[in-house]
């Protein structure tokens, strides 16, 4: 081997060694700088869509949480059929490295409040039995917030579902949908339950004393929401009067009812409430 080739071989070895050491140092440094999740940060957050909602209802918000904000990772989708049977896609880690996000989708998205609460209960039973989940957060948009409230009432004494730690409602019509033409252009059993002074809504308020007081509740309203006005969206303050309750109003006339889960303004409110210290 010539002198030049020996030098080239020697320098190549040195460069390779230095590069390997750099990679090892960088990897070790990154891993050591990652802060382990607290017990509460490991609680799955369950997202429940509203009337006529689909997989797409929370899809973009969850994508922003994961890719733009770095707040968590969606690893599980739960689908509930009309007969209440449950199938799922994905899984939940027993030791997640980022807050786990779960999406629940109802096949019948126009069903009554009572049915949706039962279906949500079935999804929660799956989390409890299949993935050993003992605590969850819930985020519900519009009717999803009502279904979640009804679910919380129905399962207050049950030991086979996860306990609800934090509960966020976004544009949820606790006093009914306030858009006058809503029941004229929409159909399904849900429309009856969503009317102001409906039997389903009255029943929630009659039984409000049965809501567990340990739940932390945030209700978000939008000034530009032409379907659920601000008083209706924050009407939850008398429903959760025994809970640690607060509300936030997004003052932006350009953000519509459905737009409230499509804006970073609401992202921040949700993220801060769930995970900020």
Image (cartoon, grey):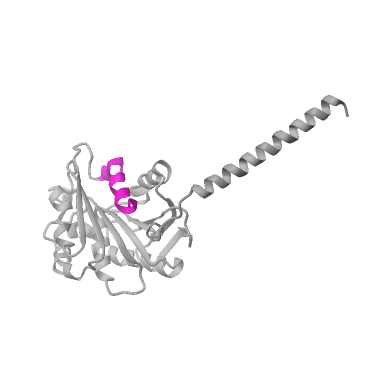
Q: Is residue 23 left or right of residue 232?
A: right
Q: Residue at x 43, y 62 (%)?
A: 87
Which residue lies most toward the top here? 4
Q: Indicate whether residue 269 is drawn in magenta.
A: yes
Position in image of residue 165 (x %, y %): 31, 62
Picture quarter containing residue 117? bottom left
* Residue 249 seen in render: yes
* Residue 112 seen in render: no
Position in image of residue 242 (x %, y %): 18, 65
Position in image of residue 15 (x %, y %): 70, 33
Q: Is residue 219 left or right of residue 126?
A: left
Q: Nearer the viewer, residue 196 or 186?
A: 196
Q: Residue at x 67, y 37 (%)?
A: 18
- In the rendered view, tell whether residue 44 sits above or below residue 265: below
Q: Indicate whether residue 257 is drawn in magenta.
A: no
Secondary structure mainly formed by the magenta segment? helix
Q: Nearer the viewer, residue 137 or 184?
A: 137
In the rendered image, which quarter contains the N terminus?
Answer: top right
> What is the count of numbered marks?
0
Q: Is residue 237 left or right of residue 133?
A: left
Position in image of residue 160 (x %, y %): 36, 73
**What's the magenta region?**
258-277
């Amino acid at each position: 081997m010539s002198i030049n080739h020996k030098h080239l071989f020697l320098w190549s070895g040195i460069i390779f060694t230095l590069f390997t050491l750099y990679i090892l140092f960088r990897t070790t440094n990154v891993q050591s700088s990652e802060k382990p999740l607290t017990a509460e940060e490991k609680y799955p957050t369950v997202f429940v869509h509203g009337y006529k909602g689909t997989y797409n209802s929370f899809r973009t918000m969850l994508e922003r949480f994961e890719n733009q904000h770095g707040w968590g990772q969606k690893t599980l989708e739960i689908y509930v059929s009309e007969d209440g049977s449950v199938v799922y896609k994905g899984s939940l880690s027993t030791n997640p490295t980022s807050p786990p996000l779960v999406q629940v989708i109802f096949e019948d998205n126009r069903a009554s409040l009572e049915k949706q609460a039962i279906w949500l209960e079935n999804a929660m039973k799956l989390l409890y039995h299949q993935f050993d989940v003992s605590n969850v957060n819930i985020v519900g948009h519009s009717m999803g917030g009502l279904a979640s409230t009804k679910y919380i009432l129905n399962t207050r004494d049950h030991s086979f579902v996860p306990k609800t730690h934090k509960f966020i409602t976004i544009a949820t019509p606790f006093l009914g949908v306030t858009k006058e033409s809503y029941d004229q252009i929409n159909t399904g059993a849900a429309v009856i339950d969503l009317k102001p002074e409906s039997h389903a809504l009255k029943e929630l308020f009659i039984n409000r004393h049965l809501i567990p007081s340990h739940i932390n509740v945030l209700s978000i309203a939008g000034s530009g929401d032409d379907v659920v006005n601000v008083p209706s969206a924050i009407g939850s303050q008398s429903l959760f009067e025994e809970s640690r309750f607060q509300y936030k109003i997004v003052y932006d006339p350009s953000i519509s009812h459905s737009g409230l889960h499509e804006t970073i303004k609401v992202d921040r409110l949700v993220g801060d409430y769930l995970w900020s210290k």
